[in-house]
Amino acid sequence: SIPDTLAIDYMDVYNAIRRKLTSAAVLDDNGMKSLKMWADKLRAAGYLVLFEDNLLTGKGVPAAFMLSPTESQWPIIDWLSWLIKPVAAGGLGYMGKCWMIDCSDTEAAAIRAAIPGAQIIVCMWHVYKAVSEQAKKKLHSDLPDRKEKIAANKTLRDGAVDDFRSLACCDSEQKFRELWHQHMLKYQAHAEWRKYLESEWLPKQKQWVWAYRKTIVQYGIETNNYVESWHSILKTFYLKLMRRQRIDVLLHILSTQVLPDFRRKDKRVRLGLSQPALNTRERQSRKLADEIPSTELEGMVRLDIEEGGSDTVPEILVMSFTMDPDLWYRVFIVEIPRLQPTELARAVIARYSCPAYTQLCVSCKHMFLA
């Protein structure tokens, strides 16, 4: 048997990995000096603009990272100000018109301060989560029997959350106002619930009601769960159990592990080795297209070379799923330029004349049929 003094346990491995990581990441014992050395190192390697537009992958890559010890708005304002500053002035030159947040008043205040006129919408998953939690605190039945009260409370709270979802899904301002009035009457006996909705959500109606959000191109994305998923991946696969790190160690992990992984995945999609990511709407659209019998496909799709297409990249006409023989939509195809001589030029569907695509800018069932 191995003597206890020679046995290797979990903490021995943990400490060895930590020492190796520290030796590679800590460029100077002085933390601030190490960060300045990292800034010079990353700048010399070209780490300024880390993203580019593309029509292939279906998802982006991180444009920038912010590391902050506080959740106040001031660091966020400084970071956003750098983010939108022109590249020539030392910034990233990113001018996002619409920003999705997770119901944080701090983030909203920072965005308004740094980017006047920016549109702000909230993640609907976080909205429903917050409303559901508050319903448990502010809605109670008056039944004396304990078991009956528990069941009545659940029914009352579930109904209130469902009613709130109906408010969020209103497709017109008039319908929202009518439903809001009905909601206030329905819950007039629950003053705390009414006060919560009137103070917290009515002033923000343009951020969560579909009647106002539908004019904003969201690419079919109504939550920021992609970002939440990324945070989970960062903690689970990159940081693992070593969460408390110096900033220079985090910079080392981001620049030598995280970003190369993102770029490799992007390159695999560009080369046709991996499939683009699809959101929920796109997966539903693909399923509808796949359900069309093969015997009907020939009559629903045709090439259109004469009216603006070319011999190499023709346009495609797709019949409406209503099977109206007079209603056809046009699929526009472009060639993705080669970024490197080793890449092949690829023709991809770029846009579509379908109203659903015009509104959401996500692949619709007609595009998958094409």
Image (cartoon, rainbow, N blue to C red):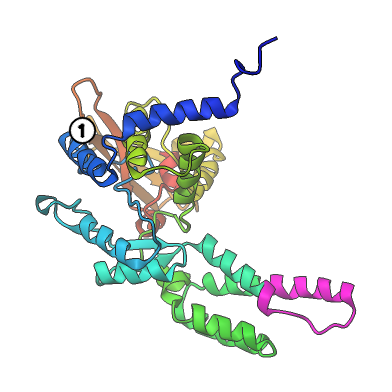
Residue named by callout 1: 337
**Residue shown at the point (44%, 73%) measured from the top left:** 211
Check the picture and name the quadrant holding the N terminus: top right
Indicate the position of residue 313 as horizontal and vertical percent values: 25, 33
Residue 27 visible in this rendered orientation of the protein? yes
Instruction: Work out which residue is located at the far front of the displayed protein and give it.
Output: 5
x then y, percent, for residue 356: 41, 56
Percent x, y of residue 355: 38, 58
Mark 1 surroundings within 10 Å by alpha-carbon count, few (fewer than 14), some (14 through 19), many (20 or more): few
Chain part drawn in magenta? 136-159
Q: Quadrant of residue 129?
A: bottom right
Seen at 57% across and 66% down, the residue is 128
Give the camera-side residue of 211 and 316: 211
| Left or right for 138, reference 219 | right
Residue type at the position of mark 1:
Pro
Query: Does residue 305 appear left or right of residue 106 in this picture?
Result: left
Give above or below for 249 relative to 67: above
Q: Is residue 102 above or below residue 163?
A: above
Q: Is residue 155 magenta?
A: yes
Q: Nearer the viewer, residue 145 or 54?
A: 145
- Magenta stretch, overall SS: helix
Residue in the picture at 44% in, 31% down: 18
Q: Is residue 188 left or right of residue 59?
A: right
In the image, is residue 312 above or below residue 139?
Answer: above
